[in-house]
């Protein structure tokens, strides 16, 4: 049998400061991007009109831009979508938002007019068209934010119920880290923030939580099994024990996400990018954020047996692998590996 | 052995149920009949999975009551009544499986799959279609009030911006009545701002305004001080289209009774046709018996008067003179407009008027080709993703991995069946969610297999290791999946259309993966162990 990271014995928690610095640096870059460039909201959120159209022969984007300027849509974006002959024109509502839905209609008409002028009436085929009023955009912004916050609250309650509030809090902090990191990634990559991308962010939330819970479940079990070890050791043991699973599951998920990224077409690509990044950050945060934060919480607000507090007690013997440590009570003996090979 | 058998029965039952819900079946659809252009019911055989608009193309509209011209007190009630009207209109309009539903309190969602002409669909949905008949201002009370209105404007300091000699133009019409001469002389004295822009038309209550001036005139007559001078029982309505007299284009303004003699509520039938003689597009209509009686009485009283036919506040064509009592039948002339426009008008008249004008707050149109491309790409990505998962699982876990892959096919079957059975819609993000969930679905198996390996390493016997592996992995699987379902539920509650599709696919996928990864794989293991009682090492 092939075994990856069997009996792995890495001191993950030791690297927590490095991990915090690394993620802090990433956040800093992300925040800088967010502050300077902001997020590239789709018109679902800003209100406005976007038209995706296809032409038989390449058109100068400059010509389209000039026509858009002509009808007074100066801030409009034009970009290729997937291929040379497929374009997207996107005009946000901007200061017409105050005119309400009449302004939205005016922008939509202007875009249609500009396309007729520059590309030629009937010379293009509209693949997708969307017009959103300012009210709907504002509603969606609020809803997206609500969804993410609400998912935190629900998770916190569920984990407090199934584990303990300390675990729940640590898991939520790790997940919040993933949301921030993912938003930073979206900003750096300049991905368009559409509803589907918000959906991807929420999926990342679910995925990252899922991963954290797998490790915490092992922590819970090991805390019962090994009464003498401190939390530092238990955390390391649990992460190491779940390492093969992490590698396998993330491997299969990354495989399907990459298939989506490469093959599933332009519409789903932002979703696939966010998911791919989310799998990385979710895995990272489960190990390097959730576990150290749990340790820190236990130290600040010790639980019943205060094993988190003991973790940094110099008198306590720190044995990175309690299972192999001589000072620990006899754990279930680890016999030599099962006879190989497979048939 | 009996345990295995009952498990197999249960799996067989699930598989049969899944396949049954996916068998192509006859579905009744309304499609336009090529010969008559009307809608008819047809049965089509197809796999009963609903495709979202982003996969099959179509338009999605979100409508709200238009509040820009004054607030509507009870928008929920208005939307509810509008929903009925829009549904009736859409049913006749000619799309298969239209969706008309109220979202929240005051928003109406309309989805038309496969619709190619969004502008026309929008026109049919948004048209208020409020039809009314009013007698024109036969006593010329409006014209007599014009000097007072001019006076009000003069007091307000409004100056005529265009002091060109209006009398020269008005002589073009050749019907210089006494009253108009008086008006002209008034112009000569004071050049009334309003009256200098209005020219008496051919019939009482009709005025013509040069096309380029009509927005100005409209803003003047909307002024409160001008409206204060308006004679009682008289309102102004613009003509629907401009008409040319000589070289210039004019817009007609009609002074009409504020009380309609009848409205479109009493209308029972409306049909479009082309008039053989004049080659005009016309809509003929028939009133209900009660409406016909009322109409008859009113028209009998007004023989010799002119009757304006007003649709959505605009006068259609030139008001005809009432020659004799009219009963239940009438017609609206649309001039040279295409017949399709006439048939759309007939359609909305049949369906009835909207209780309030609707405004579009969100609109998206997706072409069918883009949808077909999306399906194709999504399926290719799905197949490649599945192959990669198979390679990883079988490569790493060998025989056990193969069992997991076998269960994965059942997982795909269950998920699709779940979508079909509950009538959920498959969207593009849903397709992506499905592909993604294949990667996640094996997680439960990975957890179990790793657990079995650990138990084996701890020296447990093969059978006990398998048993304990499943048992001990349970906690982690349940907790992690429940939390994912919780976030998916939130996504469903908050999201719209495509995102809801994604959440649904994710939830069904998780449930299906629990069944296939835990129950099905366990059964396969049991069979395997039963068949090979002498087995000492597990291919895992």
Image: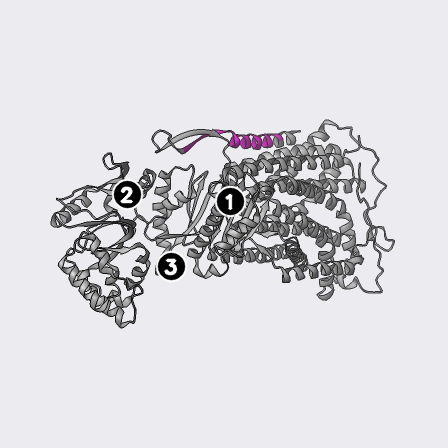
- Residue bearing the label numbered 1: A119
Frontmost of labels 2 and 1 is 1
Q: Is residue A34 magenta?
A: no
Relative to residue A45, is residue B477 depicted above or below? above
Q: CA distance from mark 3 to mark 1?
A: 34 Å
- Chain of the residue where label 1 is placed in the rendered structure: A
In percent of the image, x 65 and y 58: which residue is there?
A: A180
- Chain of the residue where label 3 is placed in the rendered structure: B
Is residue B259 at least partly visible in the picture? no
Tell me which corner region of the image, top left, top right, bottom left or bottom right, holds residue B154: bottom left
Tell me which corner region of the image, top left, top right, bottom left or bottom right, holds residue B398: top right
Residue B226, position as x, y percentages in the image = 26, 66
Q: Which residues are magenta?
A: B8-29
Residue B500, position as x, y percentages in the image = 53, 47
Frontmost of labels 2 and 3 is 2
Residue A258, position as x, y percentages in the image = 67, 42
- Residue bearing the label numbered 3: B68
- Residue bearing the label numbered 2: B334
Residue A189, position as x, y percentages in the image = 65, 52
Q: How many discs mark residues in the rendered view?
A: 3
Q: CA distance from mark 2 to mark 1?
A: 33 Å
Q: Is residue A319 left or right of residue B517?
A: right
Name the image quarter holding the N terminus of chain A.
top right
In percent of the image, x 75 and y 39: which residue is there?
A: B465
Residue furthest to the right in view is A326
Answer whether labels 2 and 1 touch (C-beta < 8 Å): no
- Chain of the residue where label 2 is placed in the rendered structure: B
């Amino acid at each position: 049998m092939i075994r990856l990271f069997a009996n792995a014995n890495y001191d993950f928690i030791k690297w927590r400061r490095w991990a915090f610095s690394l993620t802090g640096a990433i956040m800093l870059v992300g925040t800088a991007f967010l502050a300077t460039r902001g997020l590239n909201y789709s018109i679902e959120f800003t209100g406005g009109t976007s038209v995706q159209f296809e032409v038989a022969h390449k058109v100068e984007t400059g010509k389209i831009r000039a026509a858009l300027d002509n009808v007074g849509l100066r801030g409009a974006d034009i970009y290729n979508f997937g291929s040379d002959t497929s374009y997207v024109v996107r005009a946000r509502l901007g200061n017409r938002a105050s005119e309400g839905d009449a302004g939205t209609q005016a922008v939509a008409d202007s875009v249609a007019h500009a396309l007729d002028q520059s590309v030629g009436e009937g010379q293009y085929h509209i693949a997708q068209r969307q017009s959103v009023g300012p009210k709907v955009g504002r509603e969606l912004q609020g809803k997206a934010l609500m969804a993410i916050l609400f998912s935190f609250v629900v998770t916190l309650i569920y984990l407090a119920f199934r584990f303990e509030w300390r675990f729940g809090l640590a898991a939520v902090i790790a997940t919040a880290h993933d949301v921030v990191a993912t938003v930073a990634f979206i900003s750096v990559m300049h991905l368009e923030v559409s509803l589907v991308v918000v959906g991807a962010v929420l999926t990342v939330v679910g995925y990252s939580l899922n991963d954290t819970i797998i490790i915490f479940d092992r922590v819970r079990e090991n805390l019962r099994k090994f009464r003498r070890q401190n939390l530092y050791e238990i955390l390391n043991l649990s992460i190491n024990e779940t390492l093969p699973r992490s590698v396998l599951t993330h491997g299969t998920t990354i495989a399907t996400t990459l298939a989506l990224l490469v093959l599933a077409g332009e519409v789903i690509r932002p979703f696939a990018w966010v998911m791919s990044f989310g799998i990385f950050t979710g895995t990272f945060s489960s190990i390097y954020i959730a576990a150290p934060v749990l340790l820190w919480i236990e130290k600040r607000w010790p639980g019943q047996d205060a094993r988190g507090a003991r973790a940094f007690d110099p008198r306590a013997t720190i044995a990175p692998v309690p299972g192999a440590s001589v000072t620990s009570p006899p754990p279930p003996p680890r016999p030599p590996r099962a006879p190989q090979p497979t048939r | 052995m009996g345990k295995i058998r009952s498990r197999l029965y249960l799996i067989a039952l699930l598989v049969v149920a899944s396949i049954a819900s996916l068998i192509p079946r006859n579905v009744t659809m309304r499609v336009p009949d090529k010969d008559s252009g009307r809608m008819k019911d047809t049965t089509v055989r197809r796999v009963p999975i609903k495709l979202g608009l982003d996969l099959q193309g179509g338009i999605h509209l979100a409508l709200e009551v238009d509040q820009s011209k004054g607030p509507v007190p009870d928008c929920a009630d208005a939307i509810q009544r509008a929903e009925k009207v829009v549904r009736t209109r859409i049913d006749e309009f000619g799309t298969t499986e239209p969706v008309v539903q109220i979202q929240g309190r005051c928003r109406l969602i309309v989805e038309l799959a496969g619709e190619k002409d969004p502008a026309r669909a929008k026109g049919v949905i948004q048209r208020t279609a409020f039809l009314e008949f009013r007698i024109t201002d036969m006593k010329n009370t409006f014209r007599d009030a014009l000097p007072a209105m001019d006076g009000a404007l003069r007091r307000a300091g409004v100056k005529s911006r265009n002091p060109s000699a209006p009398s020269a133009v008005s002589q073009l019409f050749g019907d210089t009545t006494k009253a108009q001469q008086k008006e002209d002389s008034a112009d000569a004295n004071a050049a009334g701002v309003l009256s200098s822009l209005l020219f008496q038309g051919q019939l009482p209550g009709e005025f013509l305004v040069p096309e380029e001036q009509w927005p100005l005139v409209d803003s003047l007559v909307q002024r409160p001080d001008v409206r204060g001078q308006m004679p009682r029982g008289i309102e102004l309505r613009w003509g629907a289209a401009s008409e040319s007299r000589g070289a210039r284009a004019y817009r007609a303004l009609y002074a009409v009774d504020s009380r309609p003699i009848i409205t479109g509520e009493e209308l029972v039938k409306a049909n479009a046709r082309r008039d053989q003689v004049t080659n005009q597009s016309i809509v003929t209509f028939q009133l209900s018996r009660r409406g016909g009686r009322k109409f008859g009485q009113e028209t009998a009283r007004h023989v010799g008067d002119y009757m304006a036919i007003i649709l959505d506040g605009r006068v259609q064509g030139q008001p005809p003179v009432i020659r004799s009592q009219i009963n239940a039948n009438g017609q609206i002339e649309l001039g040279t407009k295409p017949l399709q426009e006439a048939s759309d008008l007939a359609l909305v008249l049949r369906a009835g008027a909207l209780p309030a004008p609707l405004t579009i707050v969100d609109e998206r149109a997706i072409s069918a080709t883009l949808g077909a491309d999306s399906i194709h790409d999504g399926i290719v990505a799905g197949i490649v993703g599945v192959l990669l998962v198979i390679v990883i699982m079988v490569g790493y876990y060998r025989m056990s991995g193969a069992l997991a892959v076998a269960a994965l096919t059942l997982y795909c079957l269950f998920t699709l069946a779940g979508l079909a059975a509950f009538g959920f819609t498959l969207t593009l993000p849903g397709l992506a969610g499905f592909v993604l969930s294949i990667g996640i679905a094996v997680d439960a198996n990975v957890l179990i297999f790793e657990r079995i390996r650990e138990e084996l390493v701890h020296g447990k016997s093969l059978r006990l290791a398998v048993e304990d592996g499943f048992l001990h992995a349970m906690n982690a699987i349940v907790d992690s999946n429940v939390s994912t379902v919780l976030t998916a539920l939130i996504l469903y509650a908050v999201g719209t259309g495509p995102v809801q599709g994604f959440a649904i696919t994710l939830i069904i996928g998780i449930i299906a993966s629990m069944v296939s990864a835990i129950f099905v794989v366990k059964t396969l293991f049991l069979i395997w162990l039963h068949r090979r009682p002498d087995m000492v090492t597990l291919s895992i």
